[in-house]
Image (spheres, helix red, strand yellow):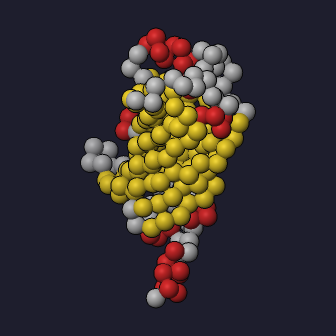
Amino acid sequence: MADDNSVTATTTSTAALPLAPGAWTLDPLHSAVNFTIRHLGIAKVRGRFAQVDAGLFVGETLADVQVTATIALASIDTGNADRDAHTRSPELLDVERRPTMTFRSTGVSGSAEDWSLEGELTIGDVTRPVTLDVEFGGVVDVPVDGSRHAGFEATGEIRRSDFGLDFGSGLLGDVVKIQLDMQFVEPREPQGQAG
């Protein structure tokens, strides 16, 4: 029994994840990058980043799967214009010096609906490892245009201090919880290619 479980856990084929090989593109209208941070230790502030570009490349094995994302830090939206302006300022995020946050995957593991995505997150000139728990929502054909979409929800957390963003200690918590809702569109088959 232990041997069977070991074989299942180390399977590298992407057949368990029914995604066509190739470069899947982000559907930005049905994707979101959200976060939560503690304020004064007693409540939460929720926000999002409105501008994100991401890609999913599916290869023949899990080792070939690559996920990348670039997020514009100036697109932060916490529902309060004054707070957002202050967050963008040199005192806090300093978006002039740190315009983007980028993610690059380094490994994928899991099966069925539950997956783990290992990667590197870079903010400014600091890069740290991060792990996201990923729930695979499935694949569906969109009747409007015939495209095929795959849905994912990813959650994880980072510490601001790991990236040198330890401003506002005592006012803001160090832990930032991340929730990503992402849809990717299957690549179209190449046109005019001989069979």
Q: Residue at x 44, y 34 (%)?
A: 36
Q: Quadrant of residue 58?
A: bottom right
Q: Residue at x 56, y 52 (%)?
A: 131
Q: Position of residue 180 (x, y in %)?
A: 44, 42
Q: Position of residue 189 (x, y in %)?
A: 47, 55
Residue 143 can be seen, yes or no:
yes
Q: Residue at x 40, y 29 (%)?
A: 42
Please tell me which residue lies in front, 103 or 141: 103
Q: Position of residue 136 (x, y in %)?
A: 40, 57
Q: Residue at x 43, y 13 (%)?
A: 81
Q: Position of residue 39 (x, y in %)?
A: 45, 26
Q: Quadrant of residue 46?
A: top left
Count of number-bearing discs = 0
Please tell me which residue lies in front, 57 or 193: 57
List the single residue furthest toward the top: 82
List the single residue furthest toward the left: 143
Residue 150 can be seen, yes or no:
no
